[in-house]
Amino acid sequence: MMTGKVESEKLRTDTKLQKKSPQRIGGARQVENVAKPMPATTNGKESSGASSPSTLNGLTKLDADTSNTLTHGDSRRRIDGPPRLPFDLRQHKISIAIFTFLAYAECCFIPLGLYYGLSKGTSMRSGLYFAIITSLFGFVSGYEFAMRSWRIMRYGEDYRPLYGSQYFRGFDATQYVLLTPFTIMTIIQVVFSCPRYPSVKALALPMPVGLIVLGGIFVVNGVAAQRGWRLMHIRLSSHVRNTVCPPLTFVFLEDVCAVDGQGGKRYRKAAMARYHASPHFRAMLMKLQWFWAVSAIVVGAAVIAVIWVVREDVAYGVGWGVPSLWAAVGTWLTVVWVQRELRIEKVTWISDRANSA
């Protein structure tokens, strides 16, 4: 009898507690039910009773967490190899070949062909044929700038930098960086082609001056990236303010493949993950930064010096021909260099990660 009475009183007490705090008990049960599928972690290690990672959009939750962690700059997460970049140049061979041909036509073939053809083959006044050359300058680069702007404004979220603005500020850094030398080159072309008999040597300056301006920007950025300075007043594409300044070689890689190559946000996330995870990848980009910066300034200064000591016909050919040759040789060296460095990165991945930890 006593036992039955005690059990009856205990049952009544439990019933009262459930009536007084149903939300608390229900909330605890709800949290418990939500938490069960998630793998419990302690200091980065999964408990023995954790279930397998769930899948979302074809990716495991572990893969998504790894990509998200690396994108935000935490490179301590252990991964077995360099994060893959979802972009294959071989799939864009035709478009790259067409753009390269048109770019060389704009910066080399058309100016040189029209100048020597019209000056030697006709009696046309120099002011007229330089006006024709100036009017054709920028048709490829201007079209490319317009297409980049259209993609970023029209499709917005798919092409803008990560964590970016939805307005015109949402343009990537490549748009602004390349606009500076292009504007200066255009001003030189327009101003010096206005006289009735323009100065041939002055009109040979746009390309070497553009090289020096772009090389100077690379030097300033290279110093900031080398010293680990933080971006205080500006952002560089997906690197927002108060993050360590990246080299412009990475910025160009991210922006060109994401916008011009139409890799979109998926490529930007993968590029950020690769950059933060791989010390060898970052070192390679810094080497390329200084290679292009120093060579651009040296070649630009040398071409300007040659322009002022040779006769006009030679000066014009040097001013428009040598920078294009430099770009071709530099691009070939970069391709060979990057292929070699990526092979080394794959071989030394584990040791590099251990040393940087």
Image: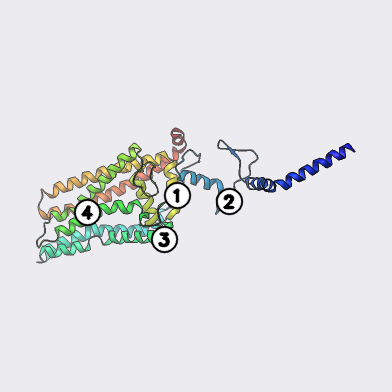
| Percent coordinates x, y for residue 139 in the rendering | 26, 62
* Residue bearing the label numbered 3: 155
Q: Which residue is mark 4?
A: 184
Identify the residue under disc 1: 269
Q: CA distance from mark 1 to mark 3?
A: 17 Å
| Residue in front for this viewpoint, 342 or 74 | 74
Here the colouring is rainbow
Label 1 sits on what residue type?
Lys
Q: Is residue 135 above or below residue 63?
A: below
Neighbour tally class for label 1: few under 14, some 14-19, many 20 plus, Cα within 10 Å = many
Residue beneath the point at 45% across and 36% down: 353
Q: Residue at x 11, y 49 (%)?
A: 308
Q: Amino acid at mark 3?
A: Tyr
Give the mark nearest the N terminus, 1 or 3.
3
Q: Which quarter of the figure has residue 201?
A: bottom left
Q: CA distance from mark 1 to mark 4?
A: 33 Å
Residue 75 coordinates in the image, percent (x, y) = 46, 40
Q: Secondary structure at mark 1?
A: helix
Mark 4 and mark 2 lie on one chain; the one further toward the N terminus is 2
Among numbered discs 3 and 4, the one appearing first in the sequence: 3
Badge 2 marks a residue whose secondary structure is: strand
Q: Let me know if residue 345 appears in the view.
A: yes
Report the residue marked by disc 2: 55
Q: Could you say whether the residue bearing mark 4 is in a helix, strand or loop?
A: helix
Left or right, 73 with reference to 206: right
